[in-house]
Image (tube, rainbow, N blue to C red):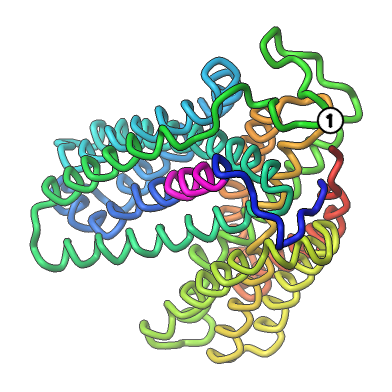
Amino acid sequence: MNVQTRTESPPPEARRARVAVSTLFFVNGFTYTNAVPWLPVIKSQLGLSNAELGLAIAAMPTGAILTGMLAGPLIHWFGSGRTAVGTSLVSLGALPFIALAQNWWMLAAALFVLGSADAWTDSAQNSHGLRVQRRYKRTIINTFHAVWSLAAVSGGLLGAAMAGSGVPILWHLGGVSVLLLCVNLLVSRMLLPGPDSSEREDGAPGEGGRRPRIPGRAVLLLVVLSVLLMFAGGIEDSAASWGAVYMTSVLEAPLFLAAMPFVACQAMMTLGRLVGDRVTDRFGAVAVGRACGLLAGGGLAFALLLPHPVTTVIGFGVMGLGVSTLFPLTLAAAGNVPGVRTGDGITIVGWLGRAGFLAFPPLVGFLADSSSMGAALWVIVGAGAGAFLLAFALRPRE
């Protein structure tokens, strides 16, 4: 990718499209996180056990895995911009049904639809973000993901405030859905027109016709990028899944401190994404990817080798900084694989990469039951090392 100097101004349509894509990322990150603080209330209202609630929540990644590969054809047929807006509207339409659920099946169905639409939106908005990045001629993909992180935190805080103040859940989720729907429709006119191959130097073969046969070398690269995304997903999820458990079960920390590894990881991950574009343009995607792998694995290793609440919070924070750009840079590389359409590359790698979010939590849990939580978390350190070794796949190939 050619690097545009900071003194060059991107064209007006690119600046408008950047605002639109940033808004789509915000809507995507803000949608479901509004419902998360309500889950204990929903569990109580429906009389669900912990296992039943867990199975209902698992309908989201299940929907993403079972239907996520449809994103590629949707992007090809309708374009990444229209697909991102349309599938985001599906998510917003499903959100109030979480509040309307009268039993386990209705709740699981709503979450299944949400998970499916989220996977489609994720692929489409990243594909359109790459179109905008090509017009900017410099890296901006990390900023989109920083907006997503900020939106996720904001959605969780708003949901917690609404649940704590006694606002009816349907009013809250229904109001959020209507508001975001209007925002989506408003920015849809600001997206880039034309086919998704417009900005690609290799012409993205197969646009406008049948899907091309993917070259063997491209298949290998997509597999490597998928494994890299699996590692990034496993690292990113570990703070939410195991940070508090490690603090309470191993370090016997109080509940307030137990939440700090997740907070530190999210805060540093957001910071890393905010500065990630400039760092990537300065040092290159491969160097940044290798540094991120070392920081992610080294941060958690520091926490495990010096088991104390303070060092653990610091270690998880360093890990969050490390994993911050791995996800955006890997998806960007997937959208630039020669001989593969942008939407197909991102869809394939994103779909396979979601396995990291599904595989790592039970793997760590199984190892923790077999040995100890401290020993099990070394798997995440290994994922950081794996990211370092596979970062060569991030090299621009346009």
Q: 52 and 124: which one is in front?
A: 124
Residue 40 as seen in the image, left or right of residue 283: left
Q: 159 and 203: which one is in front?
A: 203
Residue 391 pos. (x, y %):
83, 55
Residue 307 pos. (x, y %):
62, 88
> Which residue is painted at 61% across and 48% down in the image?
359
> Which residue is painted at 67% across and 42% down in the image?
135
Q: In which quarter of the image is residue 248?
A: bottom left
Residue 304 as seen in the image, left or right of residue 62: right
Q: Quadrant of residue 222?
A: top right
Q: 291 and 18: which one is in front?
A: 18
Residue 242 as seen in the image, left or right of residue 281: left
> Looking at the picture, does residue 216 appear above or below residue 326?
above
Residue 53 as seen in the image, left or right of residue 210: left
| Quarter of the image with the C terminus in it | top right
Q: How crowded is mark 1: few (under 14 residues within 10 Å), some or many (20 or more)?
A: many
What SS does tag 1 mark?
Answer: loop
Region in magenta: 15-25
Q: 145 and 263: which one is in front?
A: 145
> Looking at the picture, does residue 139 appear above or below residue 116?
below
> Which residue is painted at 76% across and 43% down in the image?
333
Q: Residue furthest right?
A: 217
> Which residue is painted at 17% across and 62% down in the image?
163
Residue 125 pos. (x, y %):
53, 39
Residue under pointer 1: 338
- What amino acid does circle 1 point to? Pro
Q: Is the magenta stretch mostly helix, strand or loop?
A: helix
> Looking at the picture, does residue 203 appear above or below residue 52?
above
